[in-house]
């Protein structure tokens, strides 16, 4: 297939070994196709030049400007006479100085008389309080032919500015693109003709030509619209094929017995399930009853009752003769889940034990720090089938863990587990087990479609009855110290009313912690002091504003038994105030805790703050969350905290979070399996494109799973997803 090989031609052949080496090392570009998909970051308009007055210090920039002045200064150095060329350039708004020294003076002095227009690239530095570029690279901009034509080409065209590096300036990339652009004519088109024509999209060769060499802004818009579709559609086809392949896999249908464990459990519940919980449970039970594996994402608000829904699914599977495993990201969370599940089930969690229910089963805990005897017993209970439910950490994944009949895997806080870990657990079933992924961080719909597109999604957006509202306030400790004093008074008031409180800090504060900080001393300029630490804050509170209250600390480096003891004490009401790191972020459930003070709240992400806040207001008394910060009122950090205080809607907050962070952070590992991570598609702004692409992709795959009728799409998918990457999506 010659048309394919045109884009697969190594750059060594097209551009020569020297240029290709720099392209590979500097930008990870290896083939003609890689280079054609390295799109301009922006376009400089020759009539409307880049603003020089707003250049970022210490960054490598490319500017288009006109020489206003050029002067050579002679000075006496220690080794005799020296020369310095100072060139002032302007864009009509600001000015910038270029400096050339020594032997490097003559060529630019000749090339850059006043009036010359050129592109300049270099690192912005500061000298005598003025911005300058020292020894910048430059490319003169000249029109060929007569003067009128030159003026026309000058005013008309847009100049592409490429993501560049010190070793490879934008115009060198542009020249390389010029050399390979004719190959675009042979590019295999991934979009089916009917789709492209139906949506009025440009053909791929045209889109590549227009994005690299546009004459107007309309050219750029048309090219981007088409290339967005490529990214969205190809990714959605990959996910749709995974979904389709999953429906072809065999699985054991798991239907709960008519009068079994699930019925007994439901009869014991002291409350009624919300409509949302009933609806989502039905979706899950319908999936479990089919003979192919369920792949479902259960996402919901903090405190919406996801654990209850997951537990009922596990009981249904145990009813049907199988076993269920819940994988939690931390030991604290695994222990917490184990405790709450056994409490909710009561005698139903003591199957085969004295006083246990005859319809019950065993619920075992498996973590890395368990004693040998307890661990051996847990492993035995799993392999014999005595234990219907196991809750554990990564310890569940080890080779020696064997199941009697694993029917369902529930993964809590999915984004904290590597694909391989989840896959290892799924591989422990005789046939592929059903999979339920829970995430406590609500995900905008578009991100869910892009990252978890091979999972069906269930959303719990209704809080159970009896849940109380949480009031959130920003406490500006630097501007108004009396606000912080009032915050501690509020904590005292909650304790006096019989309630409990959390104080959350970003750091532990022991010696090892300090060393780590010293090693990675990359503190932000605005962050003058290290983040507040649990051990320091607890000490100050004991001696100061919370003297006399029962204060305990909890952090990740404590021995698991000590952590468990502290959590049990707090849950039993023996501790008034728990000073902790984010180990309490998910799953910790103490209904009597009504207040939370988050110190240095600006050091946490939006979703993390929302997660933390969800630990209070879990009972009948209203919750209070105080976000303490020293950041100034105008800073982005304060605006972010204001947004968290203003809404309890996790989906809205996740949107704000995504808009403020780079996409890669959010797509994370789910995108890293795809070589072409999103270049023109943005998951928040292009919601409609992603949704439409998902529909189109599903229809194409349903009609033709092997894509026999779509060779161009098949080729593009093969390039995008090597076998390893296919497998990655399969595991995901």
Image (cartoon, rainbow, N blue to C red):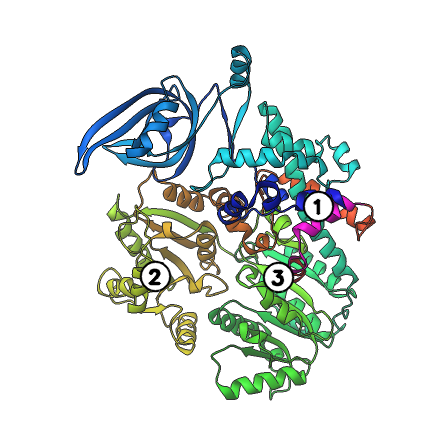
Residue 599 placement: quadrant: bottom left
Q: Say which residue label 1 marks.
A: 5
Q: Residue at point 65% right, 45% down?
A: 9
Residue 194 place in picture, x, y as percent: 79, 36
Determine whether the residue tagged by mark 3 lies in a helix, strand or loop.
strand
Q: Where are the magenta residues, as a range?
A: 710-725
Residue 667 place in picture, x, y as percent: 56, 51
Label whose residue precedes the other's in the sequence (3 or 1)? 1
Q: Is residue 53 left or right of residue 76?
A: right
Residue 555 place in picture, x, y as percent: 38, 68
Q: Residue at point 74% right, 45% down?
A: 713
Q: Is residue 694 visible?
A: no
Determine whether the residue tagged by mark 1 lies in a helix, strand or loop.
helix
Q: Is residue 568 magenta?
A: no
Mark 2–mark 1 Cα distance, whole angstroms, equals 54 Å
Q: Say which residue label 2 marks.
A: 507
Residue 169 place in picture, x, y as percent: 46, 37
Q: Are marks 2 and 1 in contact (CB under 8 Å)?
A: no
Q: Say which residue label 3 marks.
A: 437
Label whose residue precedes the other's in the sequence (2 or 1)? 1
Spot the residue most to the front: 80
């Amino acid at each position: 297939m010659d048309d394919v090989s045109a884009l697969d031609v190594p750059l060594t052949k097209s551009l020569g070994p020297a240029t290709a080496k720099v392209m590979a090392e500097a930008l990870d570009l290896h083939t003609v196709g890689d280079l054609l998909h390295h799109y301009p970051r922006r376009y400089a308009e020759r009539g409307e030049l880049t603003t020089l007055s707003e250049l970022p210090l210490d960054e490598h920039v490319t500017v288009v400007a006109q020489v206003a002045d050029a002067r050579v200064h002679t000075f006496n150095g220690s080794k005799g006479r020296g020369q310095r060329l100072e060139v002032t350039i302007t864009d009509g708004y600001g000015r910038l100085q270029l400096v050339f020294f020594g032997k490097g003076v003559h060529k630019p002095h000749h090339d850059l008389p006043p009036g010359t227009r050129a592109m300049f690239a270099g690192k912005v530095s500061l000298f005598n309080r003025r911005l300058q570029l020292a020894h910048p690279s430059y490319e003169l901009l000249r029109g060929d032919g007569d003067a009128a034509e030159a003026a026309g080409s000058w005013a008309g065209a847009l100049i592409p500015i490429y993501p560049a590096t010190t070793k490879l300036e934008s115009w060198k990339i542009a020249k390389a693109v010029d050399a390979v652009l004719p190959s675009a004519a042979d590019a295999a088109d991934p979009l089916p003709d009917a789709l492209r024509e139906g949506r009025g999209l440009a053909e791929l060769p045209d889109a590549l030509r227009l994005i690299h060499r546009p004459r107007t802004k309309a050219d750029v818009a048309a090219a981007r619209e088409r290339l967005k579709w490529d990214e969205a559609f190809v990714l959605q086809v990959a996910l749709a094929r995974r979904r389709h392949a999953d429906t072809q896999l065999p699985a054991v249908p798991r239907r709960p017995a008519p009068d079994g464990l699930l019925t007994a459990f439901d009869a014991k519940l002291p409350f009624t399930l919300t409509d949302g919980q009933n609806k989502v449970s039905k979706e899950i039970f319908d999936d479990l009853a089919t003979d192919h594996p369920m792949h479902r994402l259960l996402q919901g608000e903090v405190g919406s009752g996801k654990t209850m829904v997951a537990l009922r699914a596990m009981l249904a599977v145990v009813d049907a003769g199988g076993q269920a495993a819940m994988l939690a990201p931390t030991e604290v969370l695994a222990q917490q889940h184990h405790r709450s599940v056994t409490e909710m089930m009561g005698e139903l969690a003591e199957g085969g034990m004295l006083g246990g229910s005859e319809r019950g089963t065993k619920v075992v805990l498996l973590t890395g720090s368990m004693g040998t005897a307890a661990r051996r017993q847990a492993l035995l209970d799993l392999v014999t089938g005595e234990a219907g439910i196991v809750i554990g950490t990564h310890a569940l994944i080890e080779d020696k863990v064997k199941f009697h009949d694993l029917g369902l895997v529930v993964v809590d806080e999915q984004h904290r587990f590597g694909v391989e870990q989840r896959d290892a657990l799924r591989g422990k079933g005789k046939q592929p087990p059903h999979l339920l992924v829970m995430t406590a961080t609500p995900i905008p719909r578009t991100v869910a479609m892009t990252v978890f597109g091979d999972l069906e999604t269930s959303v719990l957006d209704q809080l159970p009855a009896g849940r109380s509202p949480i009031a959130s306030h920003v406490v500006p400790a630097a501007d108004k110290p009396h606000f912080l004093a009032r915050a501690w008074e509020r904590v005292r008031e909650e304790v006096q009313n019989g309630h409990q409180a959390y104080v959350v800090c970003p750091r532990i504060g022991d010696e090892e912690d300090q060393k780590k900080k010293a090693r990675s001393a990359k503190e932000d300029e605005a962050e003058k002091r290290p983040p507040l630490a649990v051990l320091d804050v607890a000490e100050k509170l004991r001696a100061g504003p919370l003297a006399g209250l029962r204060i305990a600390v909890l952090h990740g480096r404590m021995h698991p038994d000590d952590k468990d003891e502290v959590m049990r004490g707090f849950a039993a009401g023996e501790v008034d105030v728990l000073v902790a790191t984010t180990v309490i972020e998910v799953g910790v459930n103490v209904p009597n805790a009504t207040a939370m003070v988050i110190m240095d709240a600006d050091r946490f992400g939006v979703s993390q703050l929302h997660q933390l806040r969800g630990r209070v207001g879990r009972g009948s008394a209203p919750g209070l969350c105080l976000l303490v910060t020293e950041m100034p009122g105008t800073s982005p950090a304060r605006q972010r905290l204001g947004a968290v205080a203003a809404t309890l809607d996790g989906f809205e907050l996740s949107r704000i979070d995504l808009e403020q962070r780079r996409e890669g952070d959010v797509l994370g590992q789910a995108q890293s399996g795809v070589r072409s991570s999103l270049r023109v598609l943005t998951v928040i702004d292009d919601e409609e494109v992603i949704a439409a692409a998902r529909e189109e992709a599903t229809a194409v795959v349903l009609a033709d799973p092997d894509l026999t009728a779509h060779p161009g799409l098949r080729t593009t998918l093969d390039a995008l997803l090597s076998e390893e990457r296919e497998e990655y999506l399969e595991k995901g």
